[in-house]
Image (cartoon, grey):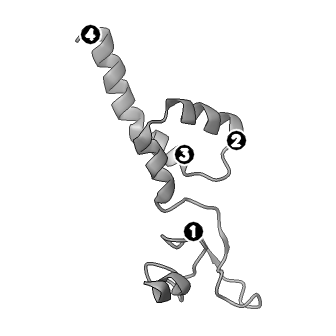
Amino acid sequence: MSRLNFLKTLSRQLMEEQLKYRLTIDVLPKTIKFRLKQYATKTYEAAGTSQRVRASGRCAFCVRAKDRKTTKVCTNCARLICRDHIIETCPDCFIDM
């Protein structure tokens, strides 16, 4: 392996985690997502199934009057869940298990 190929491989491995993280961001501009997908491999595509990073939002199970904000999401369906309703998965997915 030449020095150039080694450095390219090394830089790709160092960027891998950051690229996986960036692919999970929902509000990322389409142009950036398109570029990331060009460089993505099958391992990057599998990152979409992991827990997503989302902006703060209302809990899917609290009544609107409580207006509980959260950033936690269900690992199965990606719905927002507050601290009162979190059980690793949302209550609906927990019942299906």
N-terminal of the pair, mark 4 or mark 1, is 4
Q: How far apart are marks 2 and 3 (CA)?
A: 11 Å
At label 3, the amino acid type is: Leu
Measured as percent of width and height from the top left, residue 87 is found at: 45, 84
At label 4, the amino acid type is: Arg
At label 1, the amino acid type is: Ala
- The residue singled out by tag 2 in the image is 29
At label 2, the amino acid type is: Pro
Q: Name the residue rendered at 65%, 67% in the picture.
A: 56
Q: How far apart are marks 4 and 1 (CA)?
A: 43 Å
Q: In this view, does 57 lie above or below 54?
A: below
Q: How far apart are marks 2 and 1 (CA)?
A: 20 Å
Eye-nearest disc, 2 or 1: 1
Q: Is residue 8 above or below residue 70?
A: above
Q: Pick out the residue farthest to the left.
A: 1
Q: How far apart are marks 2 and 4 (CA)?
A: 35 Å
N-terminal of the pair, mark 2 or mark 3, is 3
Measured as percent of width and height from the top left, residue 65 is found at: 77, 91
Q: Name the residue rendered at 40%, 43% in the picture.
A: 43
Q: Do the residues labelled 4 and 1 touch (CB within 8 Å)?
A: no
Label 1, residues with CA under 10 Å away: few <14, some 14-19, many ≥20: some
Label 4, residues with CA under 10 Å away: few <14, some 14-19, many ≥20: few
Q: What element carries label 1?
A: loop
Looking at the rendering, in which quadrant would you find the C terminus?
A: bottom left
Q: What element carries label 3?
A: helix
- The residue singled out by tag 4 in the image is 3
- The residue singled out by tag 3 in the image is 23
Q: Pick out the residue farthest to the front.
A: 96
- 40 and 56: which one is in front? 40
Q: What element carries label 4?
A: helix
- The residue singled out by tag 1 in the image is 78
